[in-house]
Image (tube, rainbow, N blue to C red):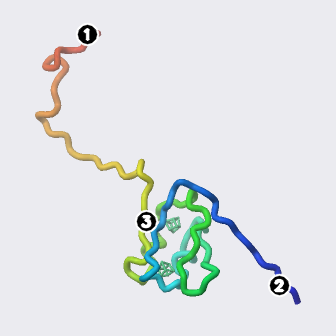
């Protein structure tokens, strides 16, 4: 019986949510199995890391990283705009409107 073959193309996207280390990845596909968004498919090459088919659909939940047993084989790379860091404001840096010359509308 003739088997149908499936092909899939990676959807182009500026996001690159997952970084794999090929030297550490065993190609077990645990990460692909756990992904709730199904953005990963097993590599056609045995022993290689999964293919990120829909990078723009990643939720950045981290499940794929947590399930990986090969430490360092996969890591998340959050979008630049989500890498904000909030720092406490120093009291001396906060000046009242009158100290700065006041608001002309008041
Ligand atoms: S990144 Fe980890 S979980 Fe995913 S295939 Fe490689 S070893 Fe397996
Ligand atoms: S971070 Fe979550 S949504 Fe993104 S690839 Fe990993 S498991 Fe899937």
Residue indicated by mark 1: 104
Q: Secondary structure at mark 1?
A: loop
Q: Is residue 23 left or right of residue 37?
A: left
| Other residues around mark 1 within 10 Å, as few (<14) / some (14–19) / many (≥20) | few
Which residue, as the protein is rendered here, is positioned at the far left?
92
Q: Are marks 3 and 1 in contact (CB under 8 Å)?
A: no
| Other residues around mark 2 within 10 Å, as few (<14) / some (14–19) / many (≥20) | few
Identify which residue, 54 or 35, lies in the foreground. Answer: 54
Q: Is residue 82 above or below residue 1?
A: above
| Other residues around mark 3 within 10 Å, as few (<14) / some (14–19) / many (≥20) | some
Which residue, as the protein is rendered here, is positioned at the far bottom?
1
Q: In the image, residue 57 lies at what x, y percent?
A: 57, 58
Identify which residue, 29 or 21, lies in the foreground. Answer: 21
Q: Are marks 1 and 2 in contact (CB under 8 Å)?
A: no
Q: In the image, residue 66 lies at what x, y percent?
A: 42, 74
Q: Secondary structure at mark 2?
A: loop
Identify which residue, 3 or 35, lies in the foreground. Answer: 3
Task: Report if the beta carbon of the residue with label 3 is closer than 8 angstroms to ligand 2.
Answer: yes
Q: Is residue 26 above or below residue 75?
A: below
Q: CA distance from mark 3 to mark 1?
A: 48 Å
Q: Secondary structure at mark 3?
A: strand
Q: Residue at point 13% right, 36% down?
A: 91
Residue indicated by mark 3: 76
Q: In the image, residue 24 lies at what x, y percent?
A: 42, 82
Q: Earlier in the sequence, mark 1 or mark 2?
A: 2
Q: Earlier in the sequence, mark 3 or mark 1?
A: 3
């Amino acid at each position: 019986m003739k088997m149908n073959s499936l092909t899939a193309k990676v959807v182009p996207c500026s996001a690159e949510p997952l970084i794999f280390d090929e030297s550490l990845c065993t190609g077990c596909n645990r990460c692909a199995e756990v992904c709730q968004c199904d953005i990963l498919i097993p590599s056609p090459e045995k022993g290689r890391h999964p293919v990120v088919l829909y990078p723009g659909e990643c939720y950045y939940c981290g499940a794929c990283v947590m399930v990986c047993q090969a430490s360092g084989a996969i890591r998340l790379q959050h979008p630049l705009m989500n890498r904000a860091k909030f720092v406490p404001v120093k009291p001396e840096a906060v000046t009242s409107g009158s100290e700065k010359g006041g608001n002309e509308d008041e």
